[in-house]
C-alpha cells in the first residue's frame, strides 16, 4: 500500500487544532503538523498531544513565515523521508479528513507525477455553504486566468486540500511564502507537465470574516497580489529555461 504523509499547516488555530487533529488521525496513521509560529496557545496544545502519541510529527517555525512557507516545510519533510506522497489539509475545520483516503487513491492511480486538488465548485453537496461573494469572485477570476495562461482546466485554484505524488513534489521548487503559493504550484506544474486533476469536496465556510492579514483583506489589493505572483512565477520558469517572459 502507498504511504502518504498528511500535513497540516497551522497558525493560531487553538480553537480547531485538537478536534481537527483527532479527526485526521482516524483516517491516516502518518501525520505531520507544521506550526508556523503560533502565539495563541496552539503550540502548547500540539506539544501536549505529541507527548502522548507517537503517530504525530511536529515541526515548529520560531516565527510566522506564511502559509506557503509552512507547506514548503511539509514538502521537504516528505522528500527527506520514504513517503510515496503528501496530502495537505487545512486546520480551520473546513476540510473533511474522511476524504484523505480518496485523495491518496486518486493520486496513486494517476501516475508518478501528479497533483490531485480538491475543488469546492466541481460538484454541489448537501449542506454546502454560500461562499463570501468577494472571495468567490476572486477565486473565479484567478482560476479562469490560470486556465487561460497555462492551458489547465481547474475549477478551484485555491483549495488547500491536495495530494501530491512524490514525483510531483520533486518537480516543484517553490519560493512563494504567502497565501498565493498555490498559484506558483500551478505555474510550475504546467511547465513540468505534471498530471493535474480535481476531486470534488464540500464547500464549508466556518468563519466568513477570517482575515488574510493586513492589506490583503482588501479585495483589489489581494487580486493584484495574486496576479503579481502569477507573473513572477511565469517569469521565473522562463528564466530557468533561457526564455523571454511572455508578458
Image: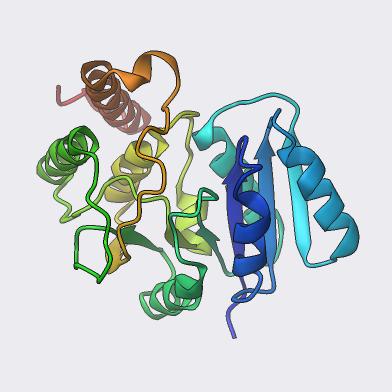
Nearer to us in this view, 80 or 106: 106
Q: Residue furthest right?
A: 51
Question: Looking at the picture, how far across and down is residue 157, in whole percent?
Answer: 27, 46
Q: Is residue 115 left or right of residue 138?
A: right
Q: Residue furthest bottom?
A: 1
Q: Is residue 211 left or right of residue 49?
A: left
Q: Is residue 36 above or below residue 125?
A: above
Total tally of numbered discs in the picture: 0
Residue at the spot 50% in from the left edge and 29% down from the top edge? 177
Q: Is residue 78 above or below residue 131?
A: below
Residue at the spot 13% in from the left edge and 36% down from the top edge? 141
Q: Quadrant of residue 84?
A: bottom right
Residue at the spot 41% in from the left edge and 64% down from the top edge? 113
Asked if residue 164 shows in the view, the reply is yes
Asked if residue 83 shows in the view, the reply is no
Question: Looking at the picture, how far across and down is residue 119, in whole percent?
Answer: 28, 59
Quarter holding the N terminus is bottom right
Q: Quadrant of residue 158?
A: top left
Question: Looking at the picture, how far across and down is residue 173, in whole percent?
Answer: 48, 39
Question: Looking at the picture, how far across and down is residue 212, in whole percent?
Answer: 41, 27
Nearer to us in this view, 198 or 236: 198
Residue at the spot 28% in from the left edge and 66% down from the top edge? 127
Quarter holding the C terminus is top left
Q: Is residue 128 left or right of residue 41?
A: left
Nearer to us in this view, 15 or 189: 15
**Coloring scheme used:** rainbow
Q: Is residue 15 above or below residue 86?
A: above
Amino acid at each position: 500500500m502507498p504511504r502518504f504523509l498528511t500535513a497540516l499547516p497551522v497558525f493560531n488555530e487553538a480553537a480547531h487544532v485538537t478536534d481537527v487533529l483527532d479527526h485526521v488521525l482516524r483516517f491516516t496513521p502518518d501525520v505531520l503538523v507544521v506550526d508556523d509560529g503560533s502565539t495563541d496557545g496552539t503550540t502548547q496544545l500540539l506539544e501536549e498531544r505529541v507527548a502522548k502519541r507517537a503517530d504525530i510529527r511536529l515541526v515548529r517555525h520560531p516565527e510566522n513565515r506564511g502559509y506557503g512557507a509552512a507547506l514548503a516545510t511539509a514538502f521537504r519533510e516528505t522528500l527527506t523521508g520514504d513517503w510515496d506522497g503528501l496530502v495537505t489539509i487545512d486546520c480551520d475545520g473546513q476540510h473533511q479528513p474522511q476524504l484523505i483516503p480518496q485523495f491518496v487513491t486518486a493520486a496513486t492511480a494517476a501516475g508518478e507525477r501528479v497533483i490531485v486538488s480538491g475543488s469546492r465548485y466541481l460538484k454541489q453537496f448537501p449542506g454546502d455553504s454560500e461562499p463570501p461573494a468577494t472571495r468567490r469572485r476572486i477565486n473565479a477570476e484567478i482560476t479562469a486566468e490560470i486556465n487561460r495562461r497555462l492551458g489547465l482546466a481547474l475549477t478551484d485554484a485555491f483549495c488547500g486540500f491536495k495530494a501530491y505524488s512524490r514525483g510531483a513534489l520533486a518537480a516543484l521548487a517553490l519560493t512563494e511564502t504567502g497565501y498565493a503559493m498555490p498559484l506558483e504550484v500551478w505555474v510550475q506544474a504546467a511547465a513540468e507537465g505534471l498530471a493535474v486533476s480535481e476531486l470534488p469536496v464540500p464547500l464549508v465556510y466556518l468563519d466568513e470574516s477570517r482575515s488574510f492579514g493586513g492589506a490583503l483583506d482588501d479585495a483589489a489589493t489581494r487580486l493584484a497580489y495574486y496576479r503579481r505572483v502569477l507573473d513572477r512565477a511565469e517569469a521565473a520558469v522562463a528564466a530557468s529555461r533561457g526564455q523571454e517572459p511572455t508578458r
